[in-house]
Amino acid sequence: MKGRASFKLISRLMTDAWIYSPDGHLEAAGIYARILEMLRPNMILAIVDTRANNPDDFALDVIHRYAVPTTMSAMRHLQVSQTLSEFPDQQHLRRIMIPAYLNAIENRRPLADRISARVLNMVTIYNRLILPQRNRAGRSEWCLVLIDVKFLLPTAPTTPLADVDLGILQMLAEGATIKEIAEASHRSARTIHHRVERLKARFGARNLAHLVGLSVSEGVADDPS
């Protein structure tokens, strides 16, 4: 099957291929070869070589990279083929990635979940499917990881905001104009304009769209530190 497809469909096709794969012998390519042309630009496909005893020595090989246009250069650093000890965000690695890989390869069962997290200077929400090598004789030697990035924004300052500013950001996110915000908050349009300009400076936003994105990202993922 050719053409772009949903994460749900691709996950089902990969899981079906995994279910019917020979025990202990099939290369990972036998599972993902059919769906490569179906992957969307917001999807990442990688193989994790899990043969090492220390998870830090697991090797990550990226097969399909995130290709949605973005100014966030951190996405490139996250998609380099490397050992996990070289992964640029070690906190995310040890909190989100390694536990899931170990769970999948030790239980030799697929793992599917939805992640909301801070990674480097970004906030992201993504769906994830992990398929370990079928190997009844022992621990899986590799696992396939499919990621569907649903949301990606730069991180924002996590400082308290005045109630009026919370209202302004809420209404901006709803698509309201400065005039509409002024009417709803019983303030002048000039006052709202000045507060918006201060919010842009506070968040380091280049424009209104950037301000809304940064304000949304602030509340999406808890800082695990």
Image (cartoon, rainbow, N blue to C red):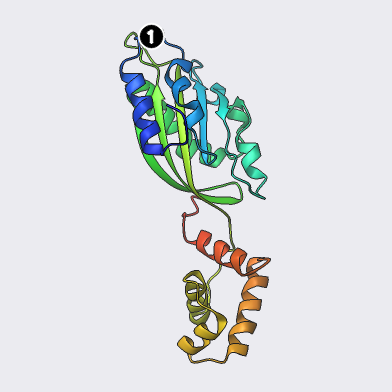
Percent position of residue 6, x then y: 41, 39
Q: Quadrant of residue 61?
A: top right
Q: Nearer the viewer, residue 98 or 177?
A: 177
Establish if 219 lies above or below 54.
below
Looking at the image, which residue sits at the far front? 2
Q: Is residue 59 visible?
A: yes
**Which residue occupies 65% across, 38% down?**
76
In the image, is residue 14 above or below residue 191? above
What residue is shown with label 1?
Answer: 24
Name the residue rendered at 45%, 26% in the picture.
35
- Report x, y in % for residue 155: 58, 56
Picture coordinates of residue 111 (x, y %)? Answer: 35, 31
What quarter of the picture does the N terminus occupy?
top left
Residue at the image point whose x is 41% and y is 29% from the top: 130
Q: Left or right of 14: which side holds 210? A: right
Q: Is residue 158 visible?
A: no
**What amino acid does circle 1 point to?**
Gly
Residue 119 or 27: which is nearer the viewer? Answer: 27
Left or right of 203 in this view: 134: left
Task: Please state which of residues 225 and 200 is positioned toward the viewer in this rendering.
Answer: 200
**How many numbered marks are there?**
1
SS assignment at label 1 = loop
Residue in view at x 52 percent, y 79 percent: 162
Task: Pinpoint residue 156: horizontal percent, then vertical percent.
Answer: 58, 61
Q: Residues within 10 Å of mark 1 (few under 14, many from 20)?
A: some
Name the one closer to the observer, 182 or 41: 41
The correct choice, above or below, for 52 with respect to 97 in the image is: above
